Image (tube, rainbow, N blue to C red):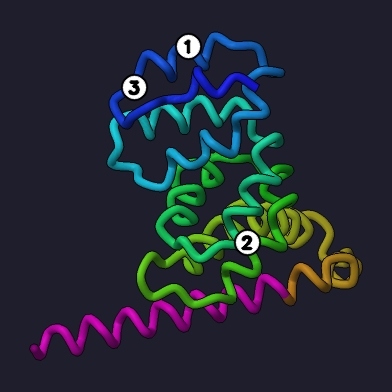
Amino acid sequence: MNHNVLPKNKQNFKSVEALARLERSMIIPLLPELLEWLQEMNWPIAAEIVDLLSKYKSETIPHIKTVFSQSDSIWIYNILAYLINKWDTDLVSILSSSLGELAHTIDIYEDTDLLSIEILWKVMFSELENERLHILNTDIGQIVNYCERNNKLLMQKDQYQNSLRRYEEIEATIRSISAFT
């Protein structure tokens, strides 16, 4: 593993450019160290690192799971907002249990719980909703079969929808309290 090519500081754009030219086999062992640059998105090279990591989505998943098991909510938020939020359904579904755990862990500082729910909702449940609407518009008789087939996901969807509603109510309460102070 050649760690000499890793950025030495937050202004080291040349290093990121050099990394982008390397073969996949040389980048993959460096993914954990590259993910560390997402700990602070204000660092000048952070966006460049996101672009680089976007080429190694499936390879970053085990390392992302490791980050999710830690308590650095800013780092987790940055990975969710700037990396995973752009992924397609197949990749997000691999992380669905980790995202589910984040969704159930209230984070009053960075809202990683809300962002996890939003990602799950957008990616996982939009297809489910599209299928439901298609059935309702084409063959209503299939709705029972749809519900039986997707029972677990539908229950999960309801749970996340209730969580989102609860968070919205909390936000509204906080806003109304803030208006009085």
Q: Amino acid at mark 2?
A: Leu
In the rendering, at what x and y percent does residue 94 appear? Answer: 74, 50
Magenta stretch bounds: 156-181
Residue shown at the point (43%, 49%) measured from the top left:
78
Mark 2 or 3, nearer chain start: 3
Instruction: Report the front residue among 111 and 16.
Output: 16
> Disc 3 versus disc 1: distance between alpha carbons?
10 Å
| Dot 3 amino acid type | Asn
Q: Give the percent coordinates (x, y) of residue 175.
A: 22, 81
Find residue 107 and report its image quarter: bottom left
Task: For mark 1, give the secondary structure.
Answer: helix
User: Disc 2 and disc 1: Cα gap in Å?
Assistant: 33 Å
Q: Which residue is mark 1?
A: 18
- Look at discs 2 and 3 and give the one toward the viewer: 3
**Residue 66 pos. (x, y %):** 64, 53
Amino acid type at circle 1 is Ala
Q: If you read the primary sequence from the N terminus, does the residue marked by circle 2 or circle 1 appear first?
A: 1
Element carrying mark 3:
loop
The residue where tag 2 is placed is 99
Residue at image position (32%, 79%) is 171
Residue placed most toward the observer, 85 or 109: 109
Report which quarter residue 49 is drawn in.
top left
Quote the CA–CA distance across marks 2 and 3: 32 Å
Of callouts 3 and 1, the N-terminal one: 3
Secondary structure, mark 2, is: helix
Q: Position of residue 158 (x, y in %)?
A: 65, 77
Residue picked out by circle 3 = 12
Q: Nearer the viewer, mark 2 or mark 1?
A: 1
Q: Residue at x 60, y 25 (%)?
A: 55
